[in-house]
Amino acid sequence: MTLIHTFATIFFLLGVIAHLAALILKVNRPLVKSIFTGEVDLEYVRDRHTLWYEEMIRQKMTGEKAEDEVEVKGECEKEKREEREAIEPSPEIESKEEEDKMASVVKVKGMSCQHCVMAVTKALGQLEGVQKVEVDLPAGEVRFENTKAVPQEEIEKAIIKAGYQVVRG
């Protein structure tokens, strides 16, 4: 009976130590903070919870309010302005962006999950001159900045090599 209690105590202490280590590690700090404050850092959500982030952006665009909405902290005025411009870009901003970078949109067939998003993002991200790749999974579109005028054929070749079809026209 004493042996059972000893092992139970050891496992209990290991569990406590594991939880303390999880609190101490920097990676988990945003989640630990959210337990106490009820707020989640926007950058943390964008980097680690892409589906949740995309849903929040969609809800902002459509004006929907989620039932279990969590307050997201860390949005500075610049980020708010950029998101508003992404929803309703002003003509002067569009012309400035066109001068600086060539924004491109490609229709891609065959994407169905986050793995597909990552594969296409990685394939295009490896092309020199292609930056800020964003995949709109429901629309089947890939948006990116073509800063060095990479030929369309090269972009299509990278998408096809990743295992997806480019829809023309």
Image: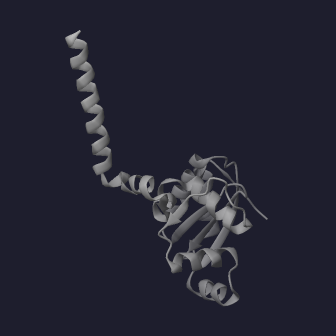
Q: Nearer the viewer, residue 10 or 27?
A: 10
Q: Residue at x 32, y 45 (%)?
A: 22
Q: Is residue 49 above or below residue 145?
A: above
Above/below status of 155 relative to 23: below
Location of residue 74 with respect to 88 vertically, above or below: above
Query: Residue at left 23%, top 25%?
Result: 10
Q: Which residue is located at x 27 percent, y 21 percent?
A: 8
Q: Is residue 19 left or right of residue 45?
A: left
Q: Whole-percent x and y of residue 122?
A: 51, 56
Q: Is residue 120 visible?
A: no
Residue at point 20%, 12% (across, down): 2
Choose top left, top right, bottom left or bottom right for residue 104.
bottom right
Viewer-proximal residue, 154 or 105? 105
Farthest residue in the bottom direction?
A: 92
Give x and y (percent) for residue 88.
70, 78
* Most distant residue in the top direction: 1
Q: Which residue is nearer to you in this view: 53 or 125?
A: 53
Image side of residue 8 versus residue 126, left or right: left
**Image coordinates for residue 79, horizontal then vertical, percent:** 53, 75
Residue 116: x and y, percent?
60, 49
User: Which quadrant does the C terminus fall into?
Assistant: bottom right
Q: Does residue 111 appear in this view? A: yes
Image side of residue 27 versus residue 94, left or right: left
Task: Describe residue 141's horizontal placement relative to residue 17 as left or right.
Answer: right
